[in-house]
Image (tube, rainbow, N blue to C red):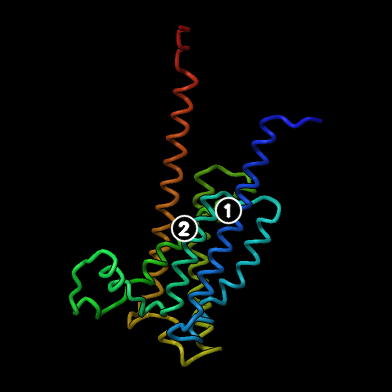
């Protein structure tokens, strides 16, 4: 049976998604390889990346039959790249202020280089913002209303964020007690884990708001097109 134009277009979209997925995997592999060269704390680098290295085969397996959307894989790549930077320097020592000064010629007061390093806060916020599309893709297999799915996605982000904090704590107690400060990155803040989870929650809520808002705009645009009067023929 001859394939229709729609079938050909669908196959092209699938191939493009697969190519983008493999491309994102290759970019992350290269970035991770570069970040493994002379990390500031080699043992901390290994601990920081252990969960990522375990999750990558799962992500590949989940996309074995149907590749996820381009935006979803690109968002995951962005998050993993941010994590690679944090793992290379340790989250408490990422020189983002110095990098901003070098790239954009921003004024850099020596006093600004001391105090709390907020890079870990950024990555926890980005976890909610950038990983949420992957969770949404997984939950699409379960029939439910869009707003209920978004609530479930937010709950998954908060739950996995809390689980990560518990895994960090257990890893330090069991595997490497001497790496506690470098690995946990609390920087003296007893509420660090709570703030990290809150930022992940905010990122997830922002992603859901943008997604649901985009759906509403698309629905309104489609409704106007259906009810628009036919144009006069020339």
Q: Quadrant of the C terminus?
A: top left
Which residue corresponds to mark 2? 130
Residue 161 screen position, x and y as percent: 48, 68
Q: Earlier in the sequence, mark 2 or mark 1?
A: 1
Taking 33 as reference, is 216 above or below it?
above
> Which residue is found at the position 45% from the left and 8% from the top?
232
Marks 2/1: CA distance? 17 Å
The picture places residue 136, in percent across and down from the top left corner, at 55, 51
Q: Are marks 2 and 1 in contact (CB under 8 Å)?
A: no
State the residue in front, 78 or 55.
78
Q: Residues within 10 Å of mark 1 (few under 14, many from 20)?
A: some
Tell me the element at label 2. Answer: helix
10 Å crowding of disc 2: few (<14), some (14-19), many (20+): many
> Which residue corresponds to the image point at 53% horizontal and 63% vertical from the top-left?
27
Near-viewer residue (204 or 117): 117
In the picture, measured across the screen, residue 66 lies left or right of residue 27, that is right
In the drawing, does residue 112 fall left or right of residue 12? Answer: left
Residue at horizontal 66 percent and vertical 55 percent from the top: 63
Query: Is residue 217 depicted above or below 174 in this figure?
Result: above
Image vertical order of residue 231 relative to residue 9, above or below: above
Residue linked to disc 1: 20
Vertical position of residue 66 compared to residue 24: above or below: above
């Amino acid at each position: 049976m001859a394939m229709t134009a729609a079938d050909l277009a669908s196959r092209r979209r699938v191939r493009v998604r697969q190519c983008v997925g493999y491309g994102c995997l290759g970019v992350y592999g290269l970035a991770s390889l570069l970040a493994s060269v002379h990390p500031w704390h080699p043992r901390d680098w290994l601990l920081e990346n252990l969960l990522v290295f375990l999750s990558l085969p799962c992500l590949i397996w989940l996309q074995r039959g149907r590749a996820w959307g381009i935006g979803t894989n690109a968002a995951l790549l962005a998050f993993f790249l941010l994590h690679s930077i944090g793992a290379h320097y340790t989250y408490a020592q990422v020189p983002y202020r110095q990098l901003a000064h070098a790239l954009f010629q921003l004024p850099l007061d020596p006093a600004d280089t001391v105090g709390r390093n907020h890079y870990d806060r950024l990555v926890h916020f980005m976890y909610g913002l950038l990983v949420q599309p992957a969770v949404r893709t997984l939950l699409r297999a379960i029939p439910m209303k869009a707003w209920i799915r978004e609530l479930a996605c937010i709950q998954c982000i908060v739950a996995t964020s809390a689980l990560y904090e518990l895994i960090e704590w257990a890893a330090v107690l069991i595997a490497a007690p001497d790496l506690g400060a470098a690995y946990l990155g609390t920087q003296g803040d007893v509420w660090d884990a709570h703030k990290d989870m809150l930022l992940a929650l905010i990122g997830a809520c922002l992603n859901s708001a943008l997604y649901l808002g985009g759906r509403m705009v698309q629905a309104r645009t489609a409704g106007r097109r259906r009810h628009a009067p036919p144009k006069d023929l020339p």
